[in-house]
Image (spheres, rainbow, N blue to C red):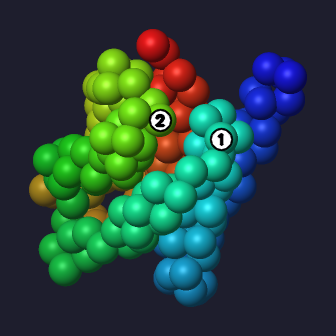
Amino acid sequence: MIYLKILGIIFLAVIAGVGFRYGGSAKHMRWARMAGVQVTELAGMALLFGWSWYMILISGLAWTECTYFKTVPRAYWYNWLLCGIQYALIPIPLAFMHIITWHGFWIRFCILVPVITTWRCIFSPANNASGPAGDKDPDWSEGGCGAWQILTLPLMLIP
């Protein structure tokens, strides 16, 4: 059973990465990011922790992933830090309802925030004031952000 959950998380991470990237490209609709990551994150949590009606709260929090600093010409490391914090806070209703432990939540938080920040800084020149705005490699930059959110979900299993 554990192997099926591992395969399920990997599969959902790929779907989330594709959805995050597809929705982030200028040629496609933003709903692909919202639906892709939101649905896969809910599915991943349901796979790991079982379904709870509190996950409806999570779907609202996951929807915020598309509302960030699109009005600034360049994104710096602290902008990506705020994105990482936003992504890491999405499952907080599960911690309040004791579906996951606070310990597992904070372990995921402390890992996901620097991973997202570093990931985006590596693949995006937006943290460099002299560089052009935009991603060096948007497939890796955006796809990785979607995938990391799902790949770190099992950390919340830590008691």
Q: Outermost residue, top direction? A: 159
> Callout 2: helix, strand or loop?
loop
The CA span between labels 2 and 1 is 9 Å
Q: Label 1 is placed on what type of residue?
A: Gly
Note whether 98 is above or below 101 in the view shown.
below
Residue 153 has which mark? none
Give residue 70's quadrant in the image.
bottom left
- Answer whether residue 137 is visible to the viewer in this image: no
| Left or right: 158, with 80 as reference point | right
Number of on-image labels: 2
Residue nearest the viewer, comparing 18 with 10: 10
Q: Identify which residue is drawn at 40% across, 69% down.
A: 60
- Residue at numbered disc 1: 50
Note whether 27 is above or below 33 in the view shown.
below
Q: Position of residue 59 (x, y in %)?
A: 48, 65
| Left or right: 150, with 1 as reference point | left
| Left or right: 14, with 151 as reference point | right
Q: Position of residue 104 (x, y in %)?
A: 40, 22
Mark 1 residue crowding within 10 angstroms, few (<14) / some (14–19) / many (20+): few
- Quadrant, the N terminus: top right
Is the C-beta separation of discs 2 and 1 under 8 Å?
Answer: yes
> Callout 1: helix, strand or loop?
loop
- Answer whether residue 43 is visible to the viewer in this image: yes
Residue nearest the viewer, comparing 79 with 38: 38
- Residue at numbered disc 2: 99
Q: Identify which residue is drawn at 36% across, 37% down.
A: 95
